[in-house]
Image: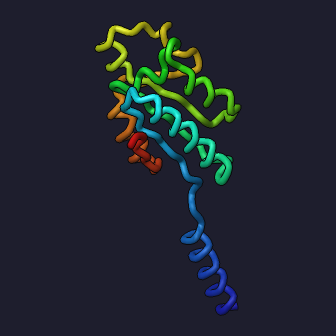
Amino acid sequence: MKNLLIALFFFAFFQGSFAQDQAKVIFHLQSADTLVYKSVVSQIKNLKKEMPTTPIEVLCHGPGIDFLRIEKSTYATSIQRLGYPDISIVGCEFTISQRKIKKEGLVPFATTVPYGLVELVKKQQEGWIYIKAGF
């Protein structure tokens, strides 16, 4: 009986230590370069091919806020067309106000956070994997 309890203890211990949480990825997009936008879309497609249940957030601030602007949203729209419910595209409200952009000027599927860099810090504290978008 004692050996059975020891065996169960080690099984539970090693089972828990080898189990990994599902990866969550946040892309940091701070560029107005459309080649970077194209690359982000490609990277998301590749990630979803290999890890289809991975939640992804694309955080746009600074010059990267153009990714969300309706008149420049070719690539943001292509992400939405992928049809994954666990991909979110987020804009920085501070950047939006600094650039005097109206929220109505952003793609309707985008959400916002008060400060982009604070969002990055919070996500990393929660265990999200950080990827800097760009070259």
Q: Which residue is drawn at 53% across and 34% down?
A: 38
The single residue placed furthest to the left in the displayed view is: 98
Q: In this view, does 96 lie to the left or right of 6?
A: left
Q: Which residue is drawn at 47% across and 41% down?
A: 26
Instruction: From the top left corner, tell me how far across and down residue 103 is, in percent.
Output: 46, 10
Residue 108, above or below 43 = above
State the scheme by which the image is colored. rainbow
- Nearest to the observer: residue 125 or residue 29: 29
The single residue placed furthest to the front in the displayed view is: 35
Instruction: From the top left corner, tell me how far across and down residue 49 is, in percent.
Output: 68, 49
Q: In this view, does 106 lie to the left or right of 1?
A: left
Q: In this view, does 63 lie to the left or right of 26?
A: left
Q: Residue at x 43, y 20 (%)?
A: 66
Image-quadrant location for residue 30: top left
Q: Quadrant of the N terminus?
A: bottom right
Q: Quadrant of the C terminus?
A: top left
Residue 25, above or below 118 = below
Q: Residue at x 44, y 24 (%)?
A: 91
Residue 12, above or below 84 = below
Image-quadrant location for residue 36: top left
- Nearest to the observer: residue 17 or residue 54: 54
- Nearest to the observer: residue 47 or residue 2: 47
Q: Is residue 102 left or right of residue 12?
A: left
Q: How many dots with numbers?
A: 0
Instruction: From the top left corner, tell me how far across and down residue 41 is, in percent.
Output: 56, 36
- Nearest to the observer: residue 13 or residue 19: 19
